[in-house]
């Protein structure tokens, strides 16, 4: 069935994609702001808001929020990224009104109790500590900071001890008032959902919001940098990053396919050469992350302290060779993997809802999977090689966790 897009008079976007053969639905409110929009000194604010809305909103306290959604077999969740925040519900088809109403309360009527805030700070600090004790997690925060030093995009989503301590109820209220503005919000639903009902619910719960949009975040610029976390673990975890491309860049699919061929699976060059042929690493892969105006292309590798330097050097050699020698067979394999990953990932209502909303946030319109597949199919071998060469042509950022690494900087 066809997805449709509507806009309320105040600018809030409503998108719906009915799906045949399902009895459930997913509905979410997608805000086009995240950690990169936080003010200096208040890192982790967006994430703290996401936590605190579940401590009480509208007429419900934390227990009532949990019980009301689970009484109908549903789930209510949220997550914060650097450039967006999501409030999301999974429900049986008859419970759309409950889901939209609860999400509206979370965003528009959070209670923000000062006592609850202090307790929740302890929870977030525990989450921060757990992240820091997970080297294959924290190394990516270190790389983000090395690639975008002194910039909002380089700060961790969770914040740090000082910034978390600085957050107060007034800051929570300012954030929701200034950032959750109608023109920056998408209410999306997919599954067994009635379009007319969703539009009525959107108007009832969000139609009275004053028109406006959140301020655009500061533009980010890639920099050559390094961050070395010398704490000792069983392995050294390495992350290298080069300048990537923004969401709307014409080469985004070419870089994605180069990334897949270089390190996207067990057949990729990085996996075959570092793990299968040399035994230098258990885990090694390439990845690409885009934002509005920039991005990162990178690789991750975990190796023993004795072999980490060798693994790092070989990984860079493999990338350089792939950019020059990528074959048509490798490109074709990466192409079908990309298409399969896209289409297989869109078989459930939650994934459809997320994809629908994010495409609208990025492109301002509905981008059907068939359009993305066509763009993937159109990438030539020359374009994929050029995307890799361009990414690797400048300097790189590096982050390590787990001990001293010779010649890492």
Image (cartoon, rainbow, N blue to C red):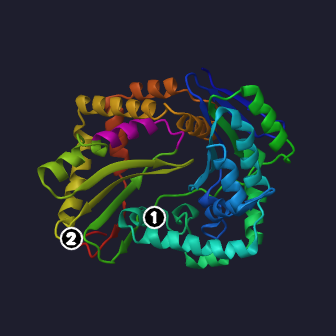
Residue at the image position 20 percent from the left and 67 percent from the top = 304
For the stretch drawn in magenta, the main secondary structure is helix
| Residue 240 against residue 100 in the figure, above or below | below
Q: Where is residue 217 drawn, in percent x and y? A: 65, 56
User: Mark 1 sits on what residue?
Assistant: 141
Residue at the image position 70 percent from the left and 55 percent from the top = 65
- Measure the alpha-carbon separation of dots 2 and 1: 21 Å
**Visible residue check, residue 56:** yes
Residue at the image position 67 percent from the left and 48 percent from the top = 69
247 lies left or right of 46 = left
| Residue 165 against residue 35 in the figure, above or below | below
**Visible residue check, residue 53:** no
As helix, strand or loop, the secondary structure at mark 1 comes to: helix
Residue at the image position 45 percent from the left and 39 percent from the top = 252
The answer to which image quadrant residue 188 occupies is: top right
Where is the C terminus found, in terms of image quarters? bottom left
Magenta stretch bounds: 247-261
User: Mark 2 sits on what residue?
Assistant: 305
- 69 part of magenta stretch: no
Name of the residue lying farthest toward the left: 277
Where is the N terminus found, in terms of image quarters? top right
Residue 377's disc is none
The answer to which image quadrant residue 59 occupies is: bottom right
119 lies left or right of 408 = right
- Say whether marks 2 and 1 touch (CB < 8 Å): no
């Amino acid at each position: 069935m066809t997805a449709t897009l509507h806009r309320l008079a105040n600018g809030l976007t409503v998108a719906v994609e009915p799906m045949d053969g399902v009895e459930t639905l997913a509905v979410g409110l997608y805000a086009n702001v995240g950690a990169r929009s936080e003010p200096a000194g208040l890192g982790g604010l967006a994430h703290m808001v996401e936590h605190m809305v579940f401590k009480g909103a509208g007429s419900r306290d934390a227990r009532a929020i949990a019980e009301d959604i689970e009484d109908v077999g549903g789930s209510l969740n949220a997550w914060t990224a650097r450039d967006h925040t999501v409030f999301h519900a999974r429900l049986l088809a008859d419970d759309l009104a409950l889901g939209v109403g609860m999400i509206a309360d979370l965003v528009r009527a959070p209670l923000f109790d000062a006592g609850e805030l202090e307790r929740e700070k302890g929870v977030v600090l525990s989450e921060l500590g757990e992240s820091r004790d997970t080297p294959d997690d924290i190394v990516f925060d270190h790389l983000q900071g090395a690639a975008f030093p002194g910039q909002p995009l380089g700060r961790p989503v969770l914040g740090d001890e000082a910034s978390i301590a600085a957050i107060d109820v007034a800051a929570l209220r300012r954030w929701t008032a200034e950032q959750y503005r109608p023109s920056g919000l998408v209410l999306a639903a997919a599954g067994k959902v009635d379009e007319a009902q969703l539009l009525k619910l959107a108007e009832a719960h969000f139609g009275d919001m004053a028109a406006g949009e959140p301020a655009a975040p500061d533009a980010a610029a890639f920099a050559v940098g390094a961050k070395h976390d010398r704490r000792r673990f069983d392995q050294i975890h390495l992350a290298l990053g080069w300048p990537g491309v923004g969401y709307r860049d014409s080469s985004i699919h070419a870089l994605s396919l180069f990334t897949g061929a270089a390190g996207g699976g067990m057949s990729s060059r990085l996996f075959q050469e570092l793990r299968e042929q040399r035994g230098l690493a258990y885990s090694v892969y390439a990845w690409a992350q885009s934002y509005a105006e920039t991005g990162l292309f990178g690789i991750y590798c975990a190796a023993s302290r004795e072999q980490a330097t060798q693994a790092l050097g070989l990984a860079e050699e493999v990338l350089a060779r792939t950019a020059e020698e990528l074959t048509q067979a490798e490109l074709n394999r990466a192409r079908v993997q990309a298409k399969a990953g896209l289409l297989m990932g869109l078989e459930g209502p939650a994934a459809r809802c997320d994809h629908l909303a994010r495409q609208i946030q990025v492109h301002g319109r509905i981008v059907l999977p068939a359009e993305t597949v066509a763009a993937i199919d159109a990438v030539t071998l020359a374009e994929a090689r050029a995307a890799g060469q361009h990414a690797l042509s400048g300097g790189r950022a590096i982050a390590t966790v787990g001990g001293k690494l010779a010649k890492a900087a």
